[in-house]
Structures are given as structure tokens and as C-alpha cells.
Image (cartoon, grey):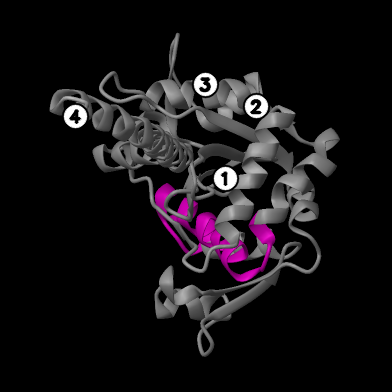
């Protein structure tokens, strides 16, 4: 007859033989579950929620109208904020140059828009914050009209820029709303500017008209990079093909958002020597914010 100790060890061994496979299977299933959870977490961290192309991009460009007296509009497209902002700058605006100062218009005529953008960036630059690269596109008025397209029309309430007497002097006394296609936009801008005194006010008139086209014409912004590409032989720019693709993605994203906004800002100036103007402290701050 077996001893009680022998029976105990025999029973224990039999029990372990039955339990060990179950323990191993349980451990294997737990390990598999942990791996699956880790993979799900890694996928979420890598962007399980898909981010649309252009949604996180922001860029700035100086749009130059090449003419006897060049005109300038700084535009900022902000994907995260779903916003496009215009800021027109006077041609007589002083920028810092190696020899002292020059103006945006004079620099553009003598050395080209690329040099004008470089000097503008250096003038606004501060060592405290990094400045976003400023690209440029320069074209004649007729080229900008072609880029906008024949169907583009803008309506502008001149009351936002002119007094009642000023509106009446150019034919908008009773109805303050002006309407213009791309071909008529230069004439409208000139009419508005003739009623205004300061270079900042005149620049704002241009920004207001350009912003109205961007706000009131569906797909206007999203189609602009393709237009720049189509008319590339008539446009001076530092943009590469990849830059245009990024701009297109950003503008298409912004244009598709229900919360999209457009607007224009004033870069305040103050008189300088020789009939030129320079950025005031507020104007300098405005440009730094746009280029941040």
C-alpha cells in the first residue's frame, strides 16, 4: 500500500500536468492582447485620425503688380486657422538696404521683386522670433486678370473705405456698393485711391478689392496656384514646383472648410524723408505677425 506522501506527490504531479498547458495558453492569449493594444496605440499616435493635406501648412507671399509704379499685396494662407489674410503695402514704403534705405517700388524696378522681398524681410526681421519665408510672384496687371478669370466678380461696399461725400464724388452716393470684374478692378482701385489721402489708406483700398474677389468667388483661392502654373511664362517667382503643390494643397483645404475666413489688415505707416513712408510700430508689428 502506497504511503500518504507518495499519493500526495502523485496527485500534485497529475494536477500540474493538467494545469500547465492551461497556464501557458492563458499567458499566450494575454501577450497577444497586449501586442494588439500596443499596435492600436501606435497607429493612433502616428495619425489614426487622418489629417488632410494642407491642414497644417502656412505660407506667405508678396504679390507684385508690375507697372510704372509697382503695387504690392502681402498674402498669408493659414491652414490651421483656415484663414487667408491680405495686406497691401505702399510702393513708397522704405526698406533697409546695404547703402541705407530704398523703397519697395524703387528696389523692384532696379533689382527685381526677389531683392525687394529680401530687403522687406530683413527690415521686418527680429532676433526674438523666427520669421516665415516670404515668397514672391510678380506679374503685369493683365496677367493677374487672366489668373483671376473672366467670370470672377467682386462687390465692395465703398462705405467701408470712403465718406458719403467721397462716395458721391465717384458715383456711389445713393448705392455705395461697387461691382467689378477682374478687368475693371484696376479702375475701381484707382477711383477709391483718388479719394484717399495717406499711402496706408490707398494700400487698404487695393487689399479690400483683392480680398473681395477671394471671398466672393467659389474656388477662386483653390484655383489660383494652377493659374500661376499655367501662366508661369509671364510670372516672375521664386516658387518651385513643390512650393506650388504645397500652396495648392493649403488653399484647397482652406477653401473646403465651412469655417473659412478671409480678411485684410492695414500696415500702418508714417511719413519719412523725400515723400516716402516707413512702418510705424503698429505697422511693423502687423507684418511680424503675418510673417511669424
| Secondary structure category for the residue under label 1 | loop
- In the rendering, which numbered label is found on residue 109? 2
Question: Distance from label 2 to label 1 (Cα)?
Answer: 34 Å
Q: Are marks 1 and 3 in contact (CB under 8 Å)?
A: no
Question: Distance from label 2 to label 4 (Cα)?
Answer: 104 Å
Mark 4 or mark 1, whichever is nearer to me: 4
Question: Distance from label 4 to label 3 (Cα)?
Answer: 91 Å
Q: Identify the residue position indicated by label 1 in the image.
A: 54
**Residue 173 showing in the rendered view:** yes
Q: Quadrant of the N terminus?
A: top left
Q: Quadrant of the C terminus?
A: top left
**Residue 278 showing in the rendered view:** no
Whether residue 242 is situated above or below residue 161 in the rendered picture: above
> Quick one: label 2, few (<14), some, or many (20+) residues within 10 Å?
some
Q: Identify the residue position indicated by label 4 in the image.
A: 8
Q: In the rendering, at what x and y percent does residue 59 appear?
A: 52, 38
- On the rendered structure, is 214 left or right of 42? right
Farthest residue to the left: give it.
Answer: 4
Q: Earlier in the sequence, mark 2 or mark 4?
A: 4
| Secondary structure category for the residue under label 3 | helix
Q: Earlier in the sequence, mark 2 or mark 1?
A: 1
Q: Residue 23's quadrant in the figure?
A: top left
Question: Distance from label 4 to label 1 (Cα)?
Answer: 73 Å
- On the rendered structure, is 135 left or right of 95? right
The residue located at (76%, 43%) in the rendering is 228
Q: Earlier in the sequence, mark 4 or mark 1?
A: 4
Mark 4 or mark 3, whichever is nearer to me: 4
Q: Residue 152's quadrant in the figure?
A: bottom right
Amino acid at each position: 500500500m502506497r504511503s500518504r506522501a507518495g499519493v500526495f506527490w502523485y496527485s500534485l504531479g497529475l494536477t500540474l500536468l493538467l494545469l500547465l498547458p492551461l497556464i501557458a495558453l492563458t499567458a499566450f492569449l494575454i501577450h497577444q492582447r497586449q501586442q494588439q493594444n500596443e499596435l492600436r496605440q501606435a497607429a493612433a499616435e502616428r495619425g489614426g485620425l487622418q489629417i488632410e493635406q494642407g491642414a497644417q501648412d502656412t505660407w506667405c507671399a508678396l504679390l507684385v503688380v508690375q507697372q510704372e509704379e509697382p503695387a504690392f499685396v502681402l498674402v498669408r494662407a493659414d491652414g490651421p486657422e483656415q484663414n487667408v489674410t491680405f495686406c497691401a503695402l505702399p510702393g513708397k514704403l522704405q526698406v533697409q538696404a546695404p547703402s541705407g534705405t530704398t523703397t519697395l517700388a524703387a528696389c523692384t524696378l532696379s533689382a527685381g521683386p526677389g531683392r525687394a522681398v529680401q530687403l522687406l524681410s530683413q527690415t521686418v526681421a527680429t532676433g526674438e522670433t523666427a520669421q516665415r519665408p516670404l515668397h514672391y510672384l510678380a506679374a503685369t496687371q493683365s496677367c493677374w486678370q487672366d489668373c483671376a478669370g473672366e467670370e470672377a466678380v467682386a462687390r465692395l461696399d465703398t462705405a467701408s473705405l470712403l465718406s458719403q461725400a467721397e462716395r458721391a464724388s465717384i458715383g456711389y452716393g445713393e448705392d455705395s456698393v461697387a461691382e467689378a470684374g477682374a478687368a475693371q478692378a484696376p479702375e475701381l482701385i484707382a477711383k477709391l485711391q483718388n479719394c484717399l489721402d495717406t499711402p496706408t489708406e490707398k494700400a487698404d483700398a487695393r487689399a479690400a478689392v483683392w480680398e473681395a474677389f477671394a471671398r466672393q468667388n467659389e474656388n477662386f483661392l483653390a484655383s489660383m496656384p494652377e493659374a500661376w502654373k499655367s501662366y508661369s511664362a509671364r510670372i516672375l517667382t521664386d516658387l518651385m514646383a513643390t512650393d506650388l503643390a504645397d500652396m495648392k494643397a493649403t488653399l484647397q483645404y482652406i477653401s473646403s472648410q465651412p469655417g473659412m475666413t478671409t480678411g485684410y489688415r492695414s500696415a500702418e505707416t508714417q511719413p519719412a524723408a523725400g515723400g516716402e513712408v516707413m512702418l510705424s510700430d503698429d505697422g511693423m508689428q502687423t507684418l511680424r505677425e503675418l510673417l511669424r
